[in-house]
Amino acid sequence: MNPLLDAEGLHKAYGPTTALAGADLRVHAGEIVSVMGPSGSGKSTLLHCAAGLTRPDAGHVGYDGQELSSLNDVKRSALRRREFGFVFQFGQLVPELTALQNVALPLRLDGVSRRTAERRATGLMDRLGLADKARSRPGELSGGQQQRVAVARALVTGPRVIFADEPTGALDSVSGEQVMEMLTRSAREAGAAVVLVTHDARVAAYADRGIVVRDGRSTERMAAR
Amino acid sequence: MTIATAFLALLEGRPQHGYDLKRAYDEHFGGDRPLHYGQVYTTLAKLLRNGLVSVDGVEGDAGPDRKRYTITEAGVTDVRRWLDEPEKPDQYLQSALYAKVVGALLTGRSAAAVLDVQREEHLVAMRELTRRKQSGDLADRIICDHALFHLDADLRWLEHTATLLDELAERIGR
Amino acid sequence: MRRVVAELALGIRLAFPSGRHGWLRTAMASAGVAIGAAALLLGASVPVMLDARQDRMLQRDDSVGLHEVPPGQTLIVASVDSQWGSNAVRGRLIWPESPAAPLPPGVPAIPGDQQMYASPALQAALAGPDGDTLRRQMPYEVVGTIAPAGLSGPHEFAYYAGYKRAEALVGVNSWRVDRFGYSLDDGEPRQGTYVVVATMLATLLLPIAIFIGAALRFGADTRDRRLAAIRLVGADSRAVLRIALGESLVPAGLGLAAGTVLYLLVRSRSADLRLFDVSVFPADISPVPVLALLVVAIVLALSAGLTLLGFRGVAVEPLGVFRRSTTWNGRLWWRLLPLAASLWLLRPVLTGASNPDEERAGIGVVLAVLALIPLVPYLVPLAARVLPSGSAAWQLASQQLRQNPAASTRAVTGIVVAVTGAIALHATFGAASARREVPDNPADPAYILQAPGPQTDAAMRARTARFESVDGIRAGTVAKYGLYGSPTSYASGHLVIGDCESLRQVATFDRCAAGDAFVVGDPGRSITLDAGKLDPAPGRKLPIPSGARPARLVGTDAQNVTFGLLLTSTPAAVAGVRPWFVETRMFASEDAPATAAGQLRGVAAEIDPLAMFTAIVPEYDKYASLRVALNLGSAVILLMMGVGLLLDVASRLHDRRRLLGVLAAVGARRSTVIWSVLLQAFVPLLAGLALAIGAGIGLGAVLMRLSQVPVTFDAAAVLAPVAVGSALVLATTVGVLLPAARRVTSTEQLRYE
């Protein structure tokens, strides 16, 4: 079976610093893949390249048969809206909007009417046990609640891949577990693949399989060599 | 890890006398419990009997001390199998793993690969525990968490060691 | 399409934030837009206002020119225009020749003899302090009020008085009209006035634009981070711009609404406002519809444009905001282009060309103010380089200034522009008012009354005495006769009769006793009086007395009159002849009261309301109202700029709070950190003020030339705006910034990072 997301031979340098020196990442539909590695290993850059947020210097990223680097900003943005979801460590919720409006945001950006968007967001938040937080603003929520809202937002468009970069990085271990449990469970139910970047093995243990990035190289690459 | 495996790993580098083997073992694996000669001779005798080593010469007076041992093909296979096989994750893992890392470095094999294999084994165990935890009750969760936290500590040790491999190789190679 | 609407709506939604910071941003931007919008709306109303005013003035115009209206259903009109302080008084003495005589606009009926209809402002002045003095000019019984239709504005002093005697004076001082509403010859506005107004507008409006920009930039970093978060969720780069545009629509919309309210407030108070002796009825103020739409468009475009401009050099990516850190190139030449262009436009003025093109000069002045804007960011790194690097605080500050001078100077630019304009205008007004006490020709009197009618020596002495009863006034009265010369020559001659004292005001001679005679120029053996009304005609002949000694005329007469005869008493041959006029010259001493002019006019009106009273020195400070407007405007602008600077520094402080916290944590003394923040605010300001002083003086010189005022500078006029500007900034910065800096430098800040 062809992988849904296939990143191969990625190189990326920021000035004199090499972030990726030949990294691969293959994700099949519906599978949860952890990407581990020490800090500075390039695992976040690998996620950014795979999601089309950063353009690699070399190598290519295929998603569902199209080459991401050949897409322009408008198409990549559309991909982010419809096919991808993102859960980052922090700073991805818009503080001015309520939790519900945050969750509905990707739908609104995609031109879904306000009523439909908020109805779908409400439904999702109900299912994820966030119904009572719908009217709160991010500043009024705990870190774990904010991350759960972020997970809900990542899921609302019915994405095929969710990119999670240290989703529990700023949380205590119990909140972290709640977020991870919610993320993996709802992703599995929705049939979404998850790319889970973490330095924490207990978080990575929620994945079906894992790869390791060290010095800009991934273990998949190493195995292939 | 057994004394026998350690001897095999030491012999893979070059043929050695029993006395040299003891000294090398004490240096790398013995810690604060040096081998006594009886252990050396029984172990070597067992290895000879199983065809994992051979005696390739006797110098001067006959006696166990003067025999020079060489690893056989079967012995090399044994060492490889030992290194390739991850240890069962348990709480006394470190010492065994450390031995393996040194073993890999002594034999010129990839210590990083040893660590990677071990990490994968650990992660498999952790994934299994996580699945059990997710489907179990609170008691199960807490039991699983206990194991998970220990494995996590091991993994952190693995990561840490991985970054120090070059330095370690240099020290051992001296 | 739906997406675009959703994006704009999202932007609008984001402009209503929860935090204090966000509200401040929206409020500041709205206030800036409101002031700008109100100013623009008022500007758009000026044409309507002037049209309405012009219209009413046309409707009541009674100047028939040379055309003589035959008697019939006519009204006899005599003009008795006058002045009361800074108010021009439009007076008309009227008398009907028929019951069907035309009625002036705003007057319900022809007043009876010695009765008048007066404007509300005139009635108020008559009832006010010193009203009795004013009343001497118009000693008529008020029987009614002139309706607005008959007035140019609510503050106009005007009256129509019934005056039977006017009948007798038709062709001399009065004339017939068969209607009101003759064409009006609009007097040319005084040279320089439009340029002054243009400079004021540039001085006031430009900082508003800069203020709006500063307000919109306030908290822009937070906004950019927020936009990056939205970008991650799938907004493309254009969608992000649309969201930001939507966000800027809110202050634009709120500002337009508030600006309209402000405009209506000003409009309702407009009856209290006066500028250049122009007052308007609130009803006159309504924007030209096209211009009003244009104002809305301009405000929306301005806020949208400033928003988009804020994204120049900034890339909002899903992973964050990236600033293209272009290294600062301080290339000077293009920054000098606007200045060069303005100097070229102003060249005729600077080289002292006789009649400079006023429009060109106006554009040049405005351009010169604009030319300062690109110069300020050049100046700041220069100052940062030139100043010696001593303390750690200055080292921190100067590095920041050198690396990002544009950011450090944005708020200062507005202050520079405002102070420059204020200095230029203050200096000009100062120079103009310094001149006002002195007539152009020092030998000329301050006031002249020229009254027709017969004369006797005794009556003339009595008239002099009446005027000298006013404090500080020295007067002299003479009778003037025109002389018949050769019709082909332009030479004109006068026969002047008056006592020795009075003659001394007209001419210089060795000595004088009653009975003396003096000749001016070479009149020959005899002189002939001019008996013609319009065309010269020879009249009575008069021999030159044998003892006549030479004399020389002084003042303006010396240039106009080439020959003549001065007599100290009226000879019998002339006794029955009416002079051209009896002229009383009045000189005001230094300690003459400010109300002298009003009293003199009163005396003159009592002698003959139709006598011609001329004030050769201005009776009031023409620029006083402008100066008030300028003071008010520049205070508001400087206050706005102070707030703008504060916002700017506060937001930079906010952005750098972590660095400052670290500095404090590693043991930098708090005073070091605070000084570095203060220096970052003050050094650009001081550099900018230095530029403003130079530019303000230069512009002031140009304006003085244009207004034909001798170029002089008063230190107070130059330094006052600088002092006010820096005091305001100092007060706001020290008062508000220091506590903020103290908070920021506490190591507590590290907790959040």
Image (cartoon, coloured by chain):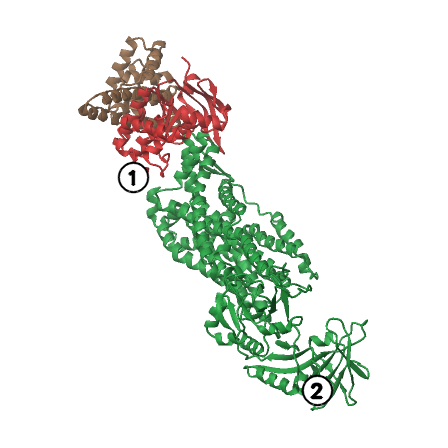
Q: Establish if C253 lies above or below B26.
A: below
Looking at the rendered structure, which numbered label has been put on residue A140?
A: 1
Q: Colour of chain C?
A: green
- For label 1, the SS is helix
Q: Residue B79's spot in the image, x, y percent?
A: 33, 15
Q: Chain of mark 1?
A: A
Q: Which residue position is annotated with label 2?
A: C570
Q: Which quadrant, please, contains the C terminus of chain C?
A: top left
**Drawn side of residue C722 relative to residue C511, left or right:** left
Q: Amino acid at mark 2?
A: Thr
Q: Colour of chain A?
A: red
Q: Colour of chain B?
A: brown
Q: Observer-nearest residue: B159 or C492?
A: C492
Q: Establish if A194 lies above or below C444.
A: above
**Picture quadrant of residue B59:** top left
Q: Residue C173's spot in the image, x, y percent?
A: 64, 71
